[in-house]
Image (cartoon, rainbow, N blue to C red):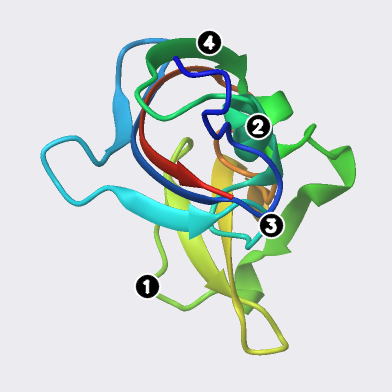
């Protein structure tokens, strides 16, 4: 590594290959064998916690990291676990615990929730990031850093 070699820092343009696996080995995403991700640090492409794991890595790095999902995607907020009234769901709506479902908000946007359980009146759904309670294994290959 050269003393003047650019390292990942806020505002840098970065091109990386990234894979993300759950602690049980399940692959969540991978760009290896596909196009790498190109972005500027801080532009919102990656979660802030994920970007923080990349800080100070130079081009040419190929490393594996372990992370807690709450450090990457934010600590789970108990207020984001809600019970949805069955009457507010489509008539043919069916879900099972653990299923991740996209919901339309009253403002017309989409949000993701994980079904925790079916209750007498509806569904108990966790609207925290689905990976916030999981152990994660990441592989990062830094292809380019320009600041």
Q: Residue at x 24, y 41 (%)?
A: 31
> Which of the two labelled residues, at mark 1 and mark 3, occupies the earlier sequence position?
1
Quadrant position of residue 118: top right
Q: Is residue 96 above or below residue 93?
A: above
Circles 1 and 3: CB distance less than 8 Å?
A: no
- Please state which of residues 144 and 127 is positioned toward the viewer in this rendering: 144
Asked whether 62 or 94 is in front, the reply is 62
Q: Which residue is mark 2?
A: 72
Q: Secondary structure at mark 4?
A: strand
- Numbered tag placed on residue 74 in the rendering: none
- Marks 2/3: CA distance? 33 Å
Q: CA distance from mark 4 to mark 1?
A: 40 Å
Residue furthest out toward the left = 33
Q: Secondary structure at mark 2?
A: helix
Q: CA distance from mark 2 to mark 1?
A: 35 Å
Which residue carries the number 1 mark? 92
User: Could you say where residue 137 lies in the image, as x and y percent from the top left?
Assistant: 44, 15
Rendering coords of residue 127 (x, y %) = 68, 51
Going by the image, does 143 lie left or right of 110? left
Which image quarter holds the N terminus?
Answer: top left
Q: Which residue in the protein does label 4 denote? A: 66
Q: Regarding mark 1 in the picture, which secondary structure is present there?
A: loop
Task: Give the labeled residue for mark 3.
Answer: 121
Q: Residue at the location (55% across, 35% down)?
A: 6
- Whole-Å distance between the Cαs marked 4 and 3? 39 Å
């Amino acid at each position: 590594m050269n003393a003047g070699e650019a390292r990942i820092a806020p505002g840098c343009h970065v091109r990386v290959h990234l894979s993300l696996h759950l602690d049980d080995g399940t692959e969540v995403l991978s760009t290896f064998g596909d196009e790498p991700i190109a972005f500027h640090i801080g532009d919102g492409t990656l979660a802030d916690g994920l970007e923080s794991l990349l800080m100070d890595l130079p081009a040419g790095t190929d490393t594996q990291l372990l992370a807690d999902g709450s450090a990457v995607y934010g600590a789970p907020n108990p207020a984001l676990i809600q019970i949805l009234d069955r009457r507010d769901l489509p008539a043919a709506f069916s879900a099972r615990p653990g299923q991740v479902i996209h919901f339309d908000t009253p403002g017309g946007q989409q949000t993701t929730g994980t079904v925790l359980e079916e209750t007498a009146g509806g569904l108990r759904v966790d609207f925290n990031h689905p990976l916030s309670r999981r152990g994660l294994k990441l592989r990062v290959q830094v292809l380019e850093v320009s600041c």
